[in-house]
Amino acid sequence: MKKIHHLLIYGIIWAISLVSCSDDDNGAEPNPENPVNEEVMKIPVVVHVIHSGFAIGEENNLSEERITRQIEILNEDFRRKEGTRGFNTHPDSEDSKIEFVLAKQRPDGTEFNGINRIDTTSIKVDVLGYGPNHYAQYAYWNPEQYINIWTTPLPRSTECLALGIATGPDIDLPGIQHLAIPQPGDAEGILISWIHFGESEIECHARYGRTLTHEMGHYLGLLHTWGGSNCELNDYCDDTPAVDRHVFGRIPFQGCAGEQVMIENYMNYTHDDVMSIFTKDQIERMRYVLTNHKGRNALLSSPALKN
């Protein structure tokens, strides 16, 4: 069954309005004469577990072990760690030197394990607050100090249908118009269905925690490999073979000009056990965002990184 990353079905009615998709190149490529910092970039994340009154570890009130394992998977993928599913030997890939840390401080400076649990049965919120992200009403921390990640309490009937969504950065890179750029009053962050957060034994190809890897790519400025579904202007990364249509499944096929698609790329809709590659150009694009986008850059010096 196909992944649907850019639509989440929540037990309320709301729509996500994406910026218009255009084939115009209206941004700037990363400047090779001004390379980004090559040190490891550490970024704090807070996981807001939005649950329905269950005990910790039951149903959508995810266990601490599952949450910490998901962050480990994220780092295995971004750091291309040998001996993990995130390792590859592809010549066009490398360690991104981007690393994610569960926040060590709350906004008030108190010690924290990075997991913020919210029981929706004890809190009443408006139906349409924070634009398309209803769940930000339960918890939304300063996006210049934390990457906000919400695990959303969707019904089990949405398994393999509703996975995740992320906002993108408003920055001078080509193709940004294909991402979900927050409008005034909207929340920034990543929403992941609790069913697809971390590793599990569900009967779905998206069960190894790669939904968050994919959505984090969007949060840091990456497009799908097909971009605007145009062979000339797809994802603006020269080392991802050009493709002008969605890439699903686990079997490679011929994309533009007869070139085989990179089925293993995290920015496809391929199966979790197939994904293993961010390319060098994709990595450069993400690091450019972390260096040049005001809000994303501020994360690198967040107090939430410190005990």
Image: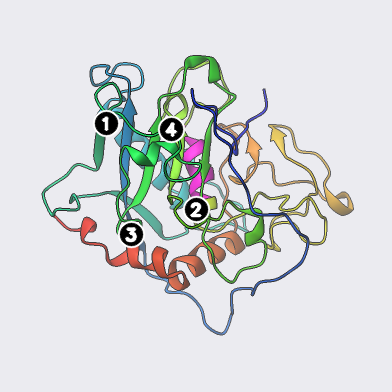
User: Mark 4 = which residue?
Assistant: 127
| Amino acid at pointer 3 | Lys
Query: Is residue 84 visible to the viewer in this orientation of the structure?
Result: no
Which label's residue is closer to the chain start, 1 or 4?
A: 1
Q: Is residue 143 magenta?
A: no
Percent x, y for residue 130?
43, 45
| Amino acid at pointer 1 | Ile
Quarter of the image where the C terminus is located: bottom left
User: Mark 2 = which residue?
Assistant: 219
Q: Would residue 157 be found to the left or right of residue 108 on screen?
A: right
Which label's residue is closer to the chain start, 3 or 2?
A: 3
Quarter of the image where the N terminus is located: top right
Find numbered disc 1 in the image and state the secondary structure of the residue it sits on.
Answer: strand
Bounds of the magenta segment: 209-217
User: Mark 3 = which residue?
Assistant: 42
Q: Looking at the image, is mark 3 or mark 1 nearer the viewer?
A: 1
User: Mark 1 = which residue?
Assistant: 118
Percent x, y for residue 229?
78, 50
Report the Cα–Cα distance between label 2 and label 4: 25 Å
Q: Counting other residues with Cα less than 10 Å from the Cα at mark 3, is it few (<14), some (14-19), or many (20 or more)?
A: some
Q: Counting other residues with Cα less than 10 Å from the Cα at mark 2, is it few (<14), some (14-19), or many (20 or more)?
A: many
Report the Cα–Cα distance between label 3 and label 1: 26 Å
Report the Cα–Cα distance between label 3 and label 2: 15 Å
| Amino acid at pointer 2 | Tyr
Q: Are marks 4 and 3 in contact (CB under 8 Å)?
A: no
Query: Is residue 36 visible to the viewer in this orientation of the structure?
Result: yes
Q: Which mark is residue 216?
A: none
Q: Residue drawn 53% across and 31% down?
A: 163
